């Protein structure tokens, strides 16, 4: 198997080549989101969804994630394979184009070669989605890779939540802080992801040098001992407890920093009807701060999830403004 650094550098070379082959796309990418007469619009001219401020950036409060299109189904290996076989780079660029046309301006994805190649293809096609990178073990273990990522102008780089929580249990949070410092030194915004409201509360109380959080509303990363104490055993697969979201929401509302919430639909477990999705979106937007947002993975193989979710977020947020 290729060394992670070698795999990533090959992908970075591919991405750089894709930008270089289309100077117009490179210039567009450097400009950031379009503006007309002071009103923020997407590159396609569509009106943006409501936005939040993150440093000097404006992010739509609905952000597209990448788990479904990059094979993280959170169900099993076969479903993950089903997703990745369909989500070719051509289809991914189409999904991102649909996002821009529907009023989204930000994409969050995990650090691996396929995602960087998809970003390059999106830019080469004239796409201008802003993006946030979530770390993986290769970049956490080799901070030199941060500089390779920064060349492609992310808004920020986020330390992975499950990894941070394992390090917390092992007494190695210093490694997380070292990574965050390397991100700070790179000049982009610094983020920390977590599924555990206790880690969020600790980081806030200790005033870590971070700009924003990614916050899972379900605590999927409990240790086997915690599950046994809570449920009497460690269930098979991922566990989504309905008691978890209120705990995370309470922690989110106490933070001074912007939170980008994920697992809004419990990794697809809350998608049996449009009404169920409505309730999930409504619950999160009702429970977080006005400058927080949500990250939702989309898999528009069987329905137009991008336009449906954009319309849903627009409707819910408009009602909150007029209420």
Image (spheres, grey):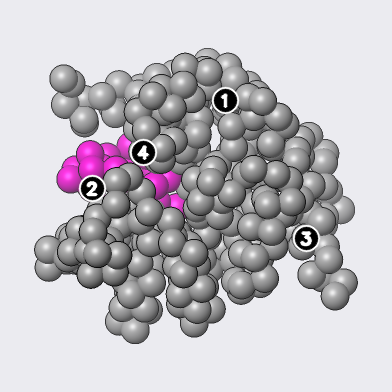
Q: Earlier in the sequence, mark 1 or mark 2?
A: 1
Spatial separation of the CA atoms under disc 3 and disc 1: 27 Å
- Per the image, the residue denoted by label 2 is 140
**Residue 316, located in which quarter of the rendered image?**
bottom right
Image: magenta residue range? 133-157
Quadrant in which the N terminus is drawn? top left
- Per the image, the residue denoted by label 4 is 111
- Left or right? Give the position of 289 relative to 37: left
Q: Earlier in the sequence, mark 2 or mark 4?
A: 4
Number of the front mark, 3 or 4: 3
Spatial separation of the CA atoms under disc 1 and disc 2: 26 Å
> Is residue 251 shown above or below 176?
below
Q: Earlier in the sequence, mark 1 or mark 4?
A: 1
> Of helix, strand and loop, which one carries label 1?
helix
Q: Residue at x 51, y 51 (%)?
A: 266
Spatial separation of the CA atoms under disc 2 and disc 4: 10 Å
Q: Residue at x 29, y 29 (%)?
A: 8
Q: Dot 2 surroundings within 10 Å: few (below 14), some, or many (20 or more)?
A: many
Q: Looking at the image, which is closer to me, 199 or 232?
A: 232
Spatial separation of the CA atoms under disc 1 and disc 4: 16 Å
- Per the image, the residue denoted by label 3 is 316
Q: Is residue 78 visible?
A: yes
**Residue 320, located in which quarter of the rendered image?**
bottom right
> Of helix, strand and loop, which one carries label 4?
loop
- Left or right? Give the position of 87 relative to 290: left
> Of helix, strand and loop, which one carries label 3?
helix
- Per the image, the residue denoted by label 1 is 92
């Amino acid at each position: 198997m290729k060394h992670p650094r070698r795999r990533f550098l090959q992908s970075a070379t591919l991405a750089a080549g894709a930008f270089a082959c289309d100077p117009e796309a490179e210039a567009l990418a450097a400009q950031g989101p379009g503006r007309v007469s002071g009103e923020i619009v997407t590159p396609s001219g569509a009106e943006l969804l409501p936005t939040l401020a993150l440093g000097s950036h404006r992010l739509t409060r609905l952000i597209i994630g990448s788990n479904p299109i990059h094979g993280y189904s959170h169900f099993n290996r076969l479903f993950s394979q089903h997703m990745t076989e369909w989500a070719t780079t051509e289809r991914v660029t189409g999904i991102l184009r649909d996002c821009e046309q529907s009023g989204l301006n930000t994409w969050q994805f995990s650090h691996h070669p396929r995602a960087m190649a998809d970003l390059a293809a999106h830019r080469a096609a004239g796409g201008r989605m802003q993006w946030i990178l979530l770390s993986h073990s290769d970049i956490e273990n080799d901070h030199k890779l941060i500089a390779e990522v920064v060349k492609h102008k992310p808004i920020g780089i986020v330390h992975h939540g499950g990894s941070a929580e394992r390090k917390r249990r092992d007494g190695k949070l210093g490694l997380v802080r070292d990574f965050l410092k390397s991100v700070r030194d790179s000049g982009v915004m610094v983020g920390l992801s977590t599924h555990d409201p206790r880690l969020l509360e600790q980081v806030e109380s200790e005033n870590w040098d971070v700009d924003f959080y990614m916050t899972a509303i379900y605590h999927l990363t409990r240790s086997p001992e915690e599950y046994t104490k809570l449920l009497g055993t460690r269930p098979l697969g991922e566990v989504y407890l309905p008691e978890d979201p209120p705990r995370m929401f309470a922690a989110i509302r106490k933070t001074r920093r912007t939170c980008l919430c994920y697992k809004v639909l419990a990794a697809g477990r809350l998608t049996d009807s449009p009404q169920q999705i409505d309730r999930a979106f409504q619950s999160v937007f009702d429970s977080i701060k006005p400058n927080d947002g949500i990250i939702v993975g989309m898999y528009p193989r069987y329905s137009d999830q991008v336009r449906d979710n954009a319309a849903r977020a627009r409707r819910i947020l408009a009602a909150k403004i007029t209420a």
